[in-house]
Amino acid sequence: MPSSKDNPVSEPAHCPVRTTLALIGGKHKAFILWNLFDGTKRFSQLQKAVPQANAKMLSQQLKELERDGLISRKAYAVVPPKVEYSLTDLGKSLKPVLSCVYEWGTSYLQSRGISPDCSMQPLDEKSEQTSGSACCCGHHPVHPEVDG
């Protein structure tokens, strides 16, 4: 009988969906990434943009995003300390993915008669990539039929 090592699809560490969700699925990671799509930010700017995250949690999520290669951290040798965070090319590649998640979530809420109420605003790129009946990635319906 083949082991899970013979079949990487059955190995959780090799599942593309599990991997993606692990990378962006932290409690505040999507919000951090979303804010960095606008450009480089200092820690204090991210704290204001993601007020649900206390300083310890924000710092932890930033460390994980940096460890995973999605953001870069630049520390300046000044007093008081100055640290800036920005997206790497890999992090920037998540823009259409998060746009699609935003669009799908908006459609889902609306299909349930719920008005979206979120501090996140649609990304500029999203409206350019969306074409009528498919989300920004072009593979999923924007207005799914959701069973009630």
Image (cartoon, rainbow, N blue to C red):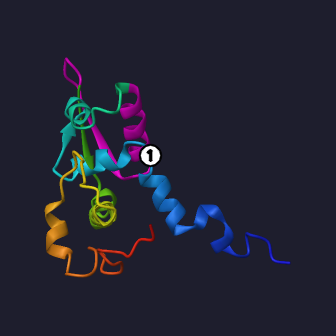
Q: Is residue 93 above or below residue 27?
A: below
User: Residue placed at 29% from the left, 54% from the top?
Assistant: 88
Q: Amino acid at mark 1?
A: Gly
Image height check: is 47 above or below 110? above
* Coordinates of residue 135 in the picture (x, y in percent): 28, 74
Say which residue appears at 43% left-offset and 34% top-offset: 60
Which type of secondary structure does the marked residue at label 1 adopt?
loop
Tell me residue 29's x, y (percent): 37, 46
In the image shown, does 127 or 2 lie closer to the viewer? 127
Q: Residue at x 36, y 33 (%)?
A: 58
- Seen from this angle, which residue lies furthest top? 79
Q: Is residue 54 magenta?
A: no
**Where does the C terminus fall, quadrant-wise?**
bottom left
Tally of numbered tags: 1
- The front one of 116 and 98 is 116
Q: Residues within 10 Å of mark 1 (few under 14, many from 20)?
A: some
Rendered image quadrant of residue 15? bottom right
Q: Which portion, as a residue range, is magenta?
A: 56-81
Could you tell me residue 117's position as x and y percent? 24, 48
Q: Position of residue 127 (x, y in %)?
A: 15, 70
Residue positioned 25% across, 82% down in the render: 133
Please state, as top left, top right, bottom left or bottom right, where the N terminus lies in the image.
Answer: bottom right
Q: Using residue 12 as the reference point, say whether residue 140 is left or right of it.
A: left
- In the rendered image, residue 71 lying in the magenta stretch gets the answer yes
Report which residue position mark 1 lands on: 26
The answer to which image quadrant residue 124 occupies is bottom left
